[in-house]
Image (tube, rainbow, N blue to C red):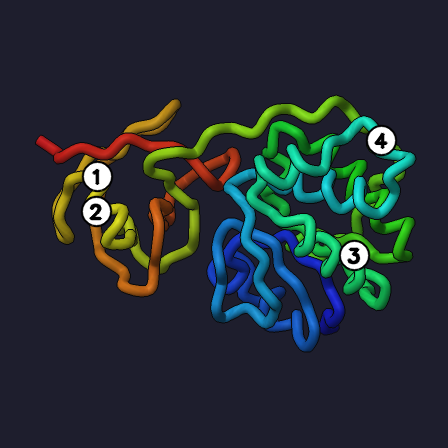
Amino acid sequence: MSYEKALCFLDMPSLKNKALCEKIKGDNINISCLEDKKFCAKFYKCEIASISFVLALLCKLQNDDKFSLLDEGYLSAESCFGEEEALEILTFLKNAKWLIMDTNLKFHKDFESIKYFLNFLSQEFKLEIIDSKEEIQNFTNAKFNELKELDNYDGLVLFNAKTGNKFLQCSKQFLQIAKCKEGQIVEISAKNLNFKTKLCLDENLQGTIGFLDFENSGFDFIQIRVKEAK
């Protein structure tokens, strides 16, 4: 089965969900903090872990009465996702067929509201919701809670991705902020996380998000500290 005319919320599907990535063809949109150039979808960028605010903005602009308590200016500014972009996507949804969400969103702290917004858009535009495992999702019982503030991802961030090796792949900017050099062995530390790895420069990467294949049972984006290993 292939998917076309889909609004996706997927992070690097060509690395994480190759089978699904190959099935999504034609006219599609993907909203993420990371651009996947191997994915057949028009890319719209947002802040890390801000999908709850992006969805809230889409719902607010679609039905101002139902979501009157939401402030579109605040949602747009915090997620770095423009109102004009949101209106373009609402136009796209009029002829869309699918909403495709990353299964990792279940670890998002505001997942209940995410489900609620997805269900609203699904019913409003008569769309099918599936996750990145291609399983149909039914969120009709989801409840809207007051939106939680977005986490601050300033600094260095680790993204859990199937890179094919155990090295941390990063950009020149990442190396500069970490004050480290390519090929250097470093110690990575975060909440409930501490290990050593080698830094590898990837000229295709930009920004402060490094890619690493590691065991993780939580959200795919983790704020980290990096220092030279001793």
What is the CA distance from the residue labelled 3 to the residue labelled 4? 18 Å
| Quadrant where the image shows the N terminus | bottom right
What is the CA distance from the residue labelled 2 to the residue labelled 3? 38 Å
Q: Residue furthest left?
A: 230
| Quadrant where the image shows the C terminus | top left
Circle 4: is it few (<14), some (14-19), or many (20+) Cα within 10 Å? Answer: few
Which image quarter: residue 193? Answer: top left
Give residue 103's position: percent from left, percent from top. Answer: 63, 46
Q: What residue is drawn where x is 84% and y is 43%? A: 119
Q: Is residue 196 left or right of residue 23?
A: left
Q: Is residue 133 visible in the rendered structure shown here? A: no
Q: Is residue 18 visible in the rendered structure shown here? A: yes
Give the residue number, with chain letter if any, for mark 2.
175
* Tag of residue 90: 3
Give the residue number, with chain letter if any, for mark 4.
68
- Against 171, residue 63 (above or below) is above
Nearest to N terminus: mark 1 or mark 4: 4
Label 1 or label 4, whichever lies nearer to me, is 4
What is the CA distance from the residue labelled 1 to the residue labelled 3? 40 Å
What is the CA distance from the residue labelled 1 to the residue labelled 4? 43 Å
